[in-house]
Image (spheres, grey):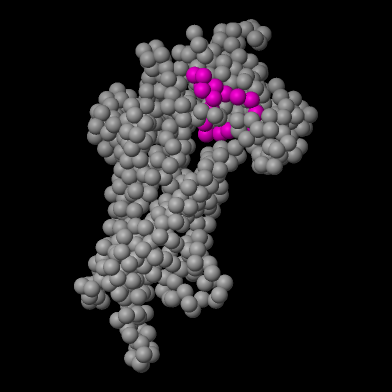
């Protein structure tokens, strides 16, 4: 099976203007327009003293085509940054990312044609209806209006929306319904790779299950590769074939859910994914607290 | 699917979306229209006021009214185009949709073409309504005016304002909190030097030099020639070509500047922040 995503030594930092243009004359240029040496020279520890936040620290990972791959991590660990880099919304400061063989920096349009994204905020033109929002989104992907309108009704009713609500302003809908419209927007363009950035955060249990069912169906029936970030351990365990746990911009563990659970001692009971998560990402905090 | 069809559909996406926004925000559009009409009339009444203040001697009030009417209409049209284009980013920041639009597989020129197409049609219709109200209220006789020539001047002037608008639209991209407000500086400077409400001869020498590089100067002069003097369209060429040249420079330059700003925003993570 081929790789859908290959992330190689991806590095991203915030909090400081990227290297000025004149520096390229001396250091050469990578795809993002920054010096490749930057990533190698700057460790997270060194940068933090200069007010720089290292969001991703030379991460490497491959995600297979047709896989549901989960990324877990505390807030600010770099999950959304990874998603944004793959979605061409951020440029890496070092390393490379390929999506189905296309480089996200050098071939962004080719990548964009193959992907779509659902984020934690269902971002829409709130005064416009789901139909108006989705037709707008679909046209950006070159889709024709009449056929799109038919598909919008099909997908939204399949996701449990009443047909009359499809024509009402988004601002009159609940957050759960808005999130379903966001998923419909992503499905309309028939992506080969779907980036789900905490898609079920804030949803009620029923809506969460409906969204999870759609994710499974997309993967099973259409072979869509899915990269999912979530704080819901049960969701990650039930949906994902493999899970990476990120902390401080680094991958601290990557394996199947059952293999991850074998990483920590049993302590009288079968460890849960949450135990693994806390063990792998909580140590540093506990240590800092103790030192403080 | 051919690239042309895909890009055309993407262009139309922005036209349709903006039309839907205007439809949904119709009360705001009504308020904006009333404000614009009141504003234009207030400026135009200065012409009659000057006649009275000057005791009626050496002051042609009707000519002054026409002079100011043309100024307000042209300025309304050009500034509407400018603001619609600069809003290409700020409106999406406000709604939170900017990441979805910028990750769509479209060229930035297609993006701007859609926004521009809507801006030109909207601004023409909006200005036509103000013209109609002004003509009725001031009993303006347009029988000798070259309306077609005036429209040609406006369309020619649109090109350069599109380029300036695209350049201005990078401000909300680079400065999420106050970028939209910063675009007012550009329009205020153009208003100052372009002779909207007065001949540029009254300006200090330095500002007169700036007037030469403002496309609005030529649009205003040409439109006044067409509407006030009834100058035939072919004789408007001396006013048309400078605006076309400025447009041919400003549009590619604007797209290049926007491309650089987008790249900077993606490097520094400024796309995500909501202002």
Q: In this picture, is B96 found above or below B53? A: above
Q: Measuring 47% from the left and 74% from the top, which residue is drawn there? A: B200
Examine the image and state in which quarter residue A251 appears. Answer: top right
Closer to us: A65 or B95: A65
Residue B64 falls left or right of residue B86: left
Residue A103 colored magenta? yes
On the question of residue A237 being in view, the answer is no
Total marks shown come to: 0
Q: In this picture, is B117 found above or below A107? A: below
**Where's residue A190, x and y in %?**
37, 23
**Where's residue A267, x and y in %?**
66, 9
Closer to us: A271 or A132: A132
Residue closest to the far right? A291
Q: Measuring 78% from the left and 29% from the top, which residue is drawn there? A: A291
Residues drawn in magenta: A88-104
Examine the image and state in which quarter residue B132 appears. Answer: bottom left
């Amino acid at each position: 099976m081929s790789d859908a995503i290959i992330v190689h030594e991806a590095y991203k930092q915030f909090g400081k203007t990227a290297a000025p243009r004149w520096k390229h004359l001396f250091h050469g240029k990578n795809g993002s327009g920054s010096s490749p040496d930057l990533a190698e020279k700057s460790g997270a520890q060194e940068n933090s003293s200069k007010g720089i936040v290292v969001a991703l620290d030379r991460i490497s990972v491959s995600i297979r085509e047709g896989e549901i791959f989960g990324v877990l991590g505390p807030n600010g660990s770099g999950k959304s940054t990874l998603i944004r880099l793959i979605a061409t919304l951020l440029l890496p400061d070092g390393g490379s990312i390929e999506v189905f063989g296309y480089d996200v920096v050098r071939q962004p349009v080719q990548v964009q044609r193959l992907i779509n994204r659902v984020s934690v905020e269902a971002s829409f033109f709130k005064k416009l209806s789901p139909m108006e929002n989705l037709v707008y989104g679909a046209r950006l992907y070159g889709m024709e209006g009449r056929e799109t309108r038919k598909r919008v009704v099909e997908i939204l009713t399949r996701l449990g929306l009443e047909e009359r609500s499809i024509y009402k302003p988004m601002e009159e809908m609940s957050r759960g319904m808005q999130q379903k419209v966001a998923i419909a927007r992503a499905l309309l363009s028939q992506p080969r790779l779907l980036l789900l950035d905490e898609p079920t955060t804030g949803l009620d249990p029923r809506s969460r299950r409906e969204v999870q069912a759609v994710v499974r169906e997309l993967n099973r029936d259409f072979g869509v590769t899915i990269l999912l970030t979530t704080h819901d351990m049960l969701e990650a365990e039930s949906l994902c074939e493999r899970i990476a746990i990120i902390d401080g911009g680094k991958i601290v563990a990557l394996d199947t859910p059952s293999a991850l659970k074998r990483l920590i001692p049993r302590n009288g009971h079968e460890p849960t994914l949450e135990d693994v998560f806390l063990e792998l990402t909580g140590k540093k905090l506990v240590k800092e607290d103790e030192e403080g | 699917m051919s690239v042309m069809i895909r890009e055309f559909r993407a262009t139309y996406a922005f036209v349709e979306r903006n039309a839907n926004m205007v439809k949904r925000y119709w009360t705001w559009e009504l308020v904006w229209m009333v404000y614009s009409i009141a504003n234009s009339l207030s400026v135009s009444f200065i012409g009659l006021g000057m006649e009275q203040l000057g005791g009626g001697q050496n002051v042609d009030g009707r000519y002054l009214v026409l002079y100011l009417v043309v100024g307000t209409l042209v300025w309304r049209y050009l500034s509407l185009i400018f603001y619609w284009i600069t809003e290409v980013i700020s409106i999406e920041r406000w709604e939170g949709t900017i990441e979805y639009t910028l990750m769509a597989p479209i060229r930035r020129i297609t993006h701007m073409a859609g926004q521009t197409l809507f801006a030109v049609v909207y601004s023409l219709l909006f200005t036509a309504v103000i013209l109609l109200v002004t003509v009725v209220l001031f009993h303006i006789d347009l029988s000798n005016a070259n309306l077609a020539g005036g429209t040609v001047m406006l369309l020619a002037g649109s090109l350069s304002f599109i380029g300036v608008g695209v350049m201005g639209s990078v401000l909300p991209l680079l400065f999420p909190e106050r970028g939209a407000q910063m675009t007012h500086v550009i329009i205020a400077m153009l208003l100052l030097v372009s002779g909207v409400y007065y001949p540029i001869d009254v300006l200090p020498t330095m500002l007169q030099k700036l007037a030469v590089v403002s496309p609005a100067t030529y649009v205003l002069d040409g439109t006044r020639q067409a509407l006030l003097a009834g100058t035939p369209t072919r004789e408007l060429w001396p006013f048309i070509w400078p605006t076309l040249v400025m447009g041919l420079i400003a549009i590619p330059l604007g797209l290049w500047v926007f491309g650089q700003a987008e790249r900077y925003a993606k490097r520094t993570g400024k796309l995500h922040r909501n202002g």
